[in-house]
Amino acid sequence: MPLSARFRTFANIKRMTEAIVPEELAVRVRELVNRFDHGDAARAAARIGAREADLRSILAAAPRQPSVAVLSAIVRGYDVDVWWLISGETEAGCSLPADRRVNTLHLLSEVGTTLTLQRWLHGSGPTAPLADDTPRT
């Protein structure tokens, strides 16, 4: 891998680390898994199209930052707001420190690009809900 590509990868990881608080992300994702998949991580992973190990890593608040692919699978599979998933905020930038806001915006852009590519490759809509899922309003 060329040095410039390694630097970009390192910069992306650094931004993600500064944008996501693993314990806070775990709480939000656990809430989704409990609500829509009865707390079953394996079922959740299969339904949203993520690797079970990646989802369990998030649920365990592992210090390893989640991939953009698993974040986009959560957004797509649960039809949740990307900003809320990453930051826990319901309005962009309301109480986050400026540096975290900037890093969150960079990560938001990366997740948005990944979502666009996934939708283009796999169809235009979110994944289909299971029969016993309640519709979201």
Image: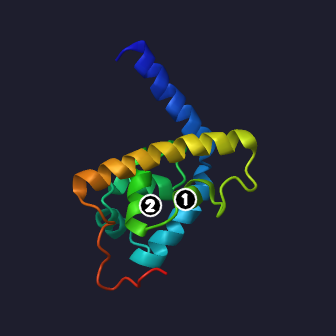
Q: Residue furthest left?
A: 122
Coordinates of residue 18 in the picture (x, y in percent): 63, 40
Amino acid under disc 2: Val
Q: How is the image coloured?
A: rainbow
Residue located 66% across and 60% down the image = 89
In what element is the residue under mark 1?
A: helix
Coordinates of residue 53 in the picture (x, y in percent): 36, 53
Residue located 71% across and 38% down the image = 99
Q: What label sits on residue 85 in the rendered view?
A: 1
Amino acid under disc 1: Leu
Cβ atoms at labels 2 and 1 below 8 Å apart: yes
Does residue 100 appear to the left or right of 22 in the view shown? right
Coordinates of residue 71 in the picture (x, y in percent): 44, 53
Does residue 88 appear to the left or right of 34 in the view shown? right
Residue at which label 2 appears: 75
Residue located 41% across and 85% down the image = 134
Coordinates of residue 34 in the picture (x, y in percent): 47, 75
Q: Residue furthest top?
A: 3
- Rendered position, 29 above or below 40: above
Q: What label sits on residue 56 in the rendered view?
A: none
- Rendered position, 39 above or below 72: below
Does residue 101 appear to the left or right of 65 in the view shown? right
Does residue 129 appear to the left or right of 96 in the view shown? left
- Rendered position, 67 above or below 125: above
Disc 2 residue crowd, few under 14, some 14–19, many 20+, Cα 10 Å: many
In what element is the residue under mark 2?
A: helix
Q: CA distance from mark 2 to mark 1?
A: 8 Å
